């Protein structure tokens, strides 16, 4: 999967799945724009990318750090203006940024609902809107939304999170239909139980309960999600759009 000459934007790139996606895309030859709130963590990822020995042309990897709150409209606009000014174009957009604010529906506060929907779903719409002009001009683009198995099957205590991730699936299909004629694809990757800081805080009891639902009998890694993102970003996936690629160890089938 050669992405030499491509420019990719990854939101939520400071840790977990976003970090793994950024590193994988860089190894495939892409230049990266790393977007998240934590500038220090982004700079650590950028240094790792800058020091890697990648294939293809053998050119040094480049990563632009863009610290921004993905839940803020104006900061999103400013971030994408910076990317275009510094890197010239956007070929690949990975909408990965996400948060949780878990609570049973009867106790969930409106502020927690709004925060999760704004960060997980509205930001993807805004980022896509900012990136799409560049893709339309060059008649080539890859938009990849990181959804979740819980956007497909629901989860008690996560009405806000599950709704936001289900919304991403709808957004993926709508955008795929809008821009397909311009050689732009839009797909989603739906991770299951992945070992990240978001799942690390869960109780052992909940983790063991989740493992019983996974036929492969283990949790996934961020790198396993990143491999799928890189594939969907490549020419090899040129005839795939509006698709949800499940990466869940068999947790959900059908």
Image: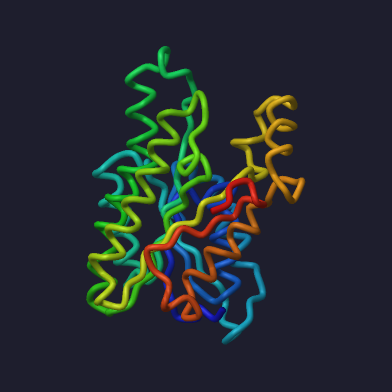
Q: Is residue 225 above or below residue 70?
A: below
Q: Is residue 96 above or below residue 154?
A: below
Q: Nearer the viewer, residue 177 or 100?
A: 177
Q: Quadrant of residue 164?
A: top left
Is 186 on the left-hand or right-hand side of 148?
left
Q: Is residue 250 visible?
A: yes
User: Can you name the residue that lies furthest to the top here?
Assistant: 107
User: Can you name the residue that lies furthest to the front here?
Assistant: 254
Colour scheme in use: rainbow
Quadrant containing the N terminus in the rendered view:
bottom right
Residue shown at the point (24%, 73%) measured from the top left? 136
Q: Position of residue 130 (x, y in %)?
A: 26, 58
Q: Position of residue 60 (x, y in %)?
A: 57, 76
Q: Position of residue 185 (x, y in %)?
A: 36, 70
Q: Nearer the viewer, residue 119 or 165?
A: 165
Q: Position of residue 118 (x, y in %)?
A: 33, 36
């Amino acid at each position: 999967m050669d992405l030499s000459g491509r420019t990719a934007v990854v939101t939520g790139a400071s840790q977990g799945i976003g970090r793994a996606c950024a590193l994988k895309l860089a190894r495939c030859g892409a230049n990266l724009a790393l977007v998240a709130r934590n500038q220090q963590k982004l700079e650590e990822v950028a240094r790792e990318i800058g020091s890697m020995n990648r294939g293809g042309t053998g050119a040094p990897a480049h990563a632009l750090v863009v610290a921004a709150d993905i839940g803020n409209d104006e900061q999103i606009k400013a971030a994408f203006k910076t990317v275009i000014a510094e890197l010239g174009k956007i070929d690949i957009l990975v909408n990965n940024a996400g948060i949780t604010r878990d609570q049973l529906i009867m106790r969930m506060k409106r502020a927690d609902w709004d925060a999760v929907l704004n960060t997980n779903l509205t930001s993807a719409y805004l980022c896509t809107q900012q990136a799409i002009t560049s893709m339309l001009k060059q008649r080539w683009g890859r938009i990849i939304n990181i959804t979740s198995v819980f956007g497909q099957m629901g989860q008690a205590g996560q009405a806000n999170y599950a709704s936001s991730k289900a919304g991403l699936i709808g957004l993926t299909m709508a955008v795929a239909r809008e821009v397909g004629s311009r050689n732009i694809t839009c797909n989603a990757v739906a991770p299951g139980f992945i070992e990240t800081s978001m799942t690390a805080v869960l109780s052992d009891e909940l983790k063991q309960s989740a493992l019983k639902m996974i036929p492969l009998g283990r949790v996934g890694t961020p790198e396993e999600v990143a491999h799928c993102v890189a594939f969907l970003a490549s020419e090899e996936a040129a005839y795939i759009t509006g698709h949800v690629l499940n990466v869940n160890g068999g947790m959900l089938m059908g």
